[in-house]
Amino acid sequence: MKMSEENSAVVSRVTAEEDVRLLMKRKDDIEEQIKAYYDMLESAGVGTDGPLVDVEGFPRADVDLYKVRTARHSISCLQNDHKAIMVEIEEALHKLHATAKVAHEQDDTQMETSGQTVDSPSPFALVDAVTHGSPAAQAGLRVGDQIMEFGSVNTHNFRNLRDIAAVVQHSEGKSLRVGVFRNGQEVHLNLTPQQWSGRGLLGCNIVPLHR
């Protein structure tokens, strides 16, 4: 593979990762704003749908009507923004998964043509529980598997378990590539987060590995 193609693949992957990070930050900011408005309405004793008039039909004197109406309107707008950002996040994750897949294919092609071997990435998390009949169990995940790749999360960009949680949350019903070390061997699985009879979308417990 030419150097320019390698650079292009790296740039695309880094750009996609940055897009996801920025979108997740915007999502968190929106959720914080919504919570702040909810808290204000609760402290005012009206909530999102409490009456703003008294029993005689007059505006309540014990409530700042302007602030309450502004907060309710802001919540409505922010909820629409939240729906839109979730769509953007899903699209960005698809793009990130696609660039990661292309990078894997290019790496595989390069190894085949050059005959070179590369060191496998270091695992960053450990599976310490898998529930029978869960999506994780059906995908073939086992207790003791050391995770080195989970969808768009890998050794290089993993920060904490919230990274994995975010990928799972926004990939419900979509197949994720999961790479693990098992008994000294590298194993790749396809795991689809989805609702099942138990809790969560995976049915397994993952803990970070100390590196």
Image (cartoon, helix red, strand yellow):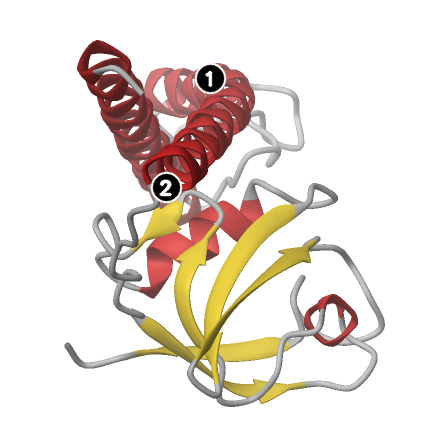
Q: Quadrant of residue 96?
A: top left
Q: Residue at x 21, y 50 (%)?
A: 156
Q: Nearer the viewer, residue 113 or 11?
A: 113
Label for residue 89? none
- x, y (%) of residue 49? 62, 33
In the depicted structure, whether residue 49 falls above or below residue 83: below
- x, y (%) of residue 36? 31, 39
Label for residue 81? 1
Q: Nearer the viewer, residue 68 or 38?
A: 38
Q: Residue at x 53, y 58 (%)?
A: 178
In the depicted structure, whether residue 44 falls above or below residue 191: above
Mark 1 Cα shell of 10 Å, populated few (<14), some (14-19), many (≥20): some
Q: Residue at x 36, y 46 (%)?
A: 39
- Under mark 2, the amino acid is Met
Q: Residue at x 78, y 59 (%)?
A: 195
In the depicted structure, whether residue 100 falls above or below residue 164: above
Task: Give whichever of discs 2 and 1 has the lower sequence position.
Answer: 1
Residue at the disc numbered 2: 111
Q: Nearer the viewer, residue 187 or 68?
A: 187
Question: Hey, which residue is sitting farthest left in the picture?
Answer: 211
In the depicted structure, whether residue 149 falls above or below residue 174: below
Q: CA distance from mark 2 to mark 1?
A: 45 Å
Which quarter of the rendering shows the C terminus? bottom left
Q: Nearer the viewer, residue 180 or 126?
A: 180
- x, y (%) of residue 66? 36, 15
- The secondary structure type at the circle numbered 1 is helix
- Under mark 1, the amino acid is Asp
Q: Quadrant of residue 111?
A: top left
